[in-house]
Image: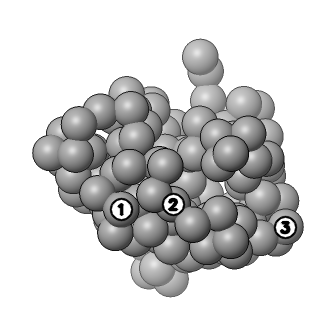
Amino acid sequence: MIRSHPARRMVGFGVALLLVVAACGDDAADPERFCEINDELEQLGDPFEVDPDEARDVVRQGRLLLDEAVKVAPDELRDSVEVAADSFGVFLDLAESTDFDASQLDEADFEAAFSDEAIAAAQALEEWLDANCSA
């Protein structure tokens, strides 16, 4: 079952992955805003836990926050940000292709989206968020 896969944890705190994209060279890191964006993304919730129309809105809002996060990602996270963002982008595409019906996800595609490298990147991000963002 997809929900029991270790990569599902990435989805659980997964919206935090939306935070992460390779930051643009000229944009200034803003760790405080990065933490705020994480909170906003977590409040959006899991697109699989709501009806498809609301899920599309969650993804749309998440992608807008992601665009902002690109500009404020902390320098020390850039490599992890790149890997996790690519992975989560694939996941969002899969989710949208099934109209947000987790039972329709192909497990092999899901697992491919969350490689060992992506899981390690997500863990690095979670550790940074835990250490640097107040609860």
Q: Amino acid at mark 2?
A: Leu
* Position above or below: 109 against 120: below
Residue that protrudes farthest toward the bottom in the picture: 25
Foreground of the two, 69 or 103: 103
The reply to whether the C-beta atoms of the residues labelled 2 and 1 are less than 8 Å apart is yes
Residue that protrudes farthest toward the left in the picture: 53
Q: Residue at x 59, y 36 (%)?
A: 12
Q: Quadrant of residue 46?
A: top left
| Residue 45 circle label | none
Q: Amino acid at mark 3?
A: Asp
Q: Residue at x 77, y 70 (%)?
A: 115
Judging by the rendered image, the residue that carries numbered circle 1 is 98
N-terminal of the pair, mark 3 or mark 2, is: 2
Local crowd size for mark 1, using a 10 Å CA cut-off: few (<14), some (14–19), many (≥20): some
| Residue 105 circle label | 2
Local crowd size for mark 3, using a 10 Å CA cut-off: few (<14), some (14–19), many (≥20): few
N-terminal of the pair, mark 1 or mark 3, is: 1
Cα gap from disc 1 to disc 3, whole angstroms? 24 Å
**Total number of numbered labels?**
3
Judging by the rendered image, the residue that carries numbered circle 3 is 116
Q: Amino acid at mark 1?
A: Thr
Cα gap from disc 3 to disc 2, whole angstroms? 19 Å
